[in-house]
Each structure stands twice: as structure tokens, then as C-alpha cells.
Amino acid sequence: MSTVKQRKTGKNSKKQKGKSKSKSNTGSSNNASPPKSKKASSKAKFNQKPKGKPLIPLPLIFRMVVSCMFLFSVYAVKRYYVSKYVNKTSDGAAEKTTTTITGNLTIDDDFNDIINVQDVHLDAATFEDISPRITQLPQTASIPNLRVVKIDQFWSPEMALHISNQIYQEFMNPVQRNESFLFSVNRGNEKIRGNDNIHQKTLEAHAMHKYDRFSYCKYEYRRSLPLYQQLLSYLNSSEVTRLMSKVFDVEMIGVSDLFVSVYYKDNFLSTHDDRGLGHYAFVSFLSQDWDFDENGGALNFNCAAPHKRQESCLEIKFGFNENVFFKVWPDSVSHFVTNVKVNKPRIAITGWYFTHGKGVHWPGIAEETGYGEK
């Protein structure tokens, strides 16, 4: 059954009549082609390709898949050439791309390029079999509670040189020194940081030391800088904490506190213990070609006997890239760093690991790590 629509009358019909009249006039003027039928015009309209649009629109999901494949191929090519460049070496002079400590180096990089763990065997049954570079210093009867473990070549050779060279260069440049370091002294157990009146602060620190009061003066690397943050992440990594746990036969959770220090001429650290800072202290020595006899700056442990408390019963003269670990809780042995006698930077990383036991004064740690000038 067909229906017939009624035509609208009025203005619209007049317009339609006008349009049809104009169309007929146009058609009469073009004598080249006869007027097309309704069926032919609709067929031509169907066959006409729309401008700027595909004849058959692709599904959205198909276009997304193609785009993802293209982006992935670009990433793969870029990754290939970057890795090829980084691993490139020459047969003659070494062109190996060394790791830069100031870049975005993270713990996800090859850890063998950061910590020297190639000869470490964490499944070893005895202490001596963990690594030939790990030794325990003989205990002395004068300090019965002291146990010192030494690890030679702790950092990879490239990383040790990077850290040492960067600290040295930043310190020896007076402008950069002021930006990267803060001169640190103390008033009792309160640390005072700031680069003003360094000479006067040094004299006051020595005066306190003369009267057997706890005192020190040294430079500390700013904790907000990338180098400090990266060193902290490396030493907190599972690779290092598992190694420390194996060496000391106790689960190490992480680093409770850490600072990178430079002792310059007339800098020192008087007798003290590390009670409350952590459970195991460590010192990573990174000064190259350092002569302790001429330069000073050796780590000394005080005798246990009451009448010899101010004397040294063990002096440690570090080698470059050598780490020394010793227990500071529950029995903490007093120690000190002798005065540096030369205008050369004594570079070291000092920190503490903590376990599940008590003995860490966390409010003091929080105050220490809240870095800033006072």
C-alpha cells in the first residue's frame, strides 16, 4: 500500500516552483545533454566519491592497532641504536661510554656497573667464601667489643672514579663549592651548617677540642643534589643490603642516615660514638693517592681501658675505594678522625645501616636529615 504526501502550500511551494523553474531554464540553456531522469541522477550521486573521506571507513580499533604498531616500531629502532651506541667500544684507546653519576642513572641499570658484586657469592656457607675482597680485621685485646669488616673495591672501578672526580672537581672550584657543600660545625649535639665565617668557625671548633669537648668541622655535600640521592638509592638497594646481611649474619633493612663529607685543611672530628644513629656504621673512602702520614685524616678507635679512653688503639688508613664496616650498637666503640694537615680534600661517604633491633634515635635522625642552614 502506497501513501501519497500532500504538498505544502504557501511560500514553500512558491520557492519550490521558483527552483524548478530555474532548473528548467538551466537545462534548456545546456543543449549538449538531455535532461537526466530521477533514477540516473540518484545513481550518479551514489557513485560520486566524497572528498577527504575513505570509500569504506576503517573501524576505529583497526586504526588504533596500526598506530600502536607504528609507535612500537619507532621505539624499537630508537632503543636498538641507543644501546648500540652505549655499548660501543674501540680496539685501541678505550671509547667505552662510562656511566655518568649526574645523569638519570637509576637502580634499574646494570648493577655490575655500580657496585662491584661480580665475585660475590651470597649462597656461600662461610664468611671467607662470600668474596675474596671481604676480610675481617683481627680483633685487638685493647678493644674487645670492636669488630671491623673491610671490603676492597666496593664500588666498580668506573663508578668509584666518577664519584671521586665529581666531588673533587666541585669542591676545588670555589664557586661550585659554595653551591654544592655546606660547612658544618657543632654546638653540643646540634649541627650548624652554613658557609659564612668559615675561618672563625674553624678556630672555635679547635678551641672546643682543646678543652676535650665534642667538636668537629668539615664540609658536607648537599643532600638535595642528584649525586647524594643516587648514592643513597644504591646503598639502600637489595643487592647491598643482602650482602651486608650475609656478612654480619643479621637482616639489614636499609640506611638510617648518610652523608658525603670532605675534610679539608684543619678539619677534624673529635672522639665520639655513633650511639643512636644506626646499628652498623660504614665509611667508603674515595680520595685518590691519599698519604695518611703526610695528610692526616685517619680513622682511629679509642682504647677500652678507662685510663686510655683518649688514646688510639687501632688506626685505619684506607685505600682508595675501600669500605670499612663496624658495629655501633648495642656496644659502641669511641672513635675519631685526625686533623687534616694539607689543602687537599679527604673524600668519604659515611652512613649507618639499621636492623629490626632497637637503638636508633629516629627523632634525631629526622632532625639530621631535615637539611638546611641553621
Image: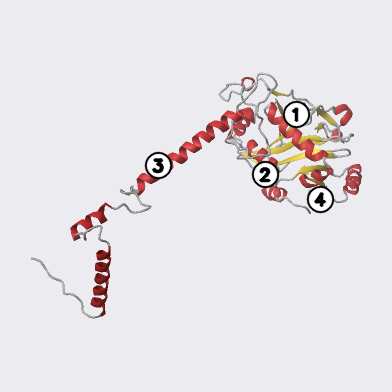
Pointers 2 and 4 in contact (C-beta within 8 Å)? no
Q: Which residue is mark 1?
A: 144
- On-image quarter of the N terminus: bottom left
Q: Residue at x 71, y 38 (%)?
A: 351
**Residue under pointer 3:** 66
What's the amino acid at mark 2? Val
Residue placed most toward the observer, 368 or 314:
368
User: At label 3, which amino acid type do we have?
Assistant: Val
x, y percentage for residue 275? 73, 41
Q: Is residue 254 above or below residue 192?
A: above
| Residue at which label 2 appears | 360
- Mark positioned earlier in the residue sequence (2 or 4): 4
Q: For the residues carrying marks 1 and 3, which lies nearer the camera in this image?
A: 3
Is label 3 in a helix, a strand or a loop?
helix
Callout 2 secondary element: loop
Q: CA distance from mark 2 to mark 4?
A: 27 Å
Q: Position of residue 41 (x, y in %)?
A: 23, 58
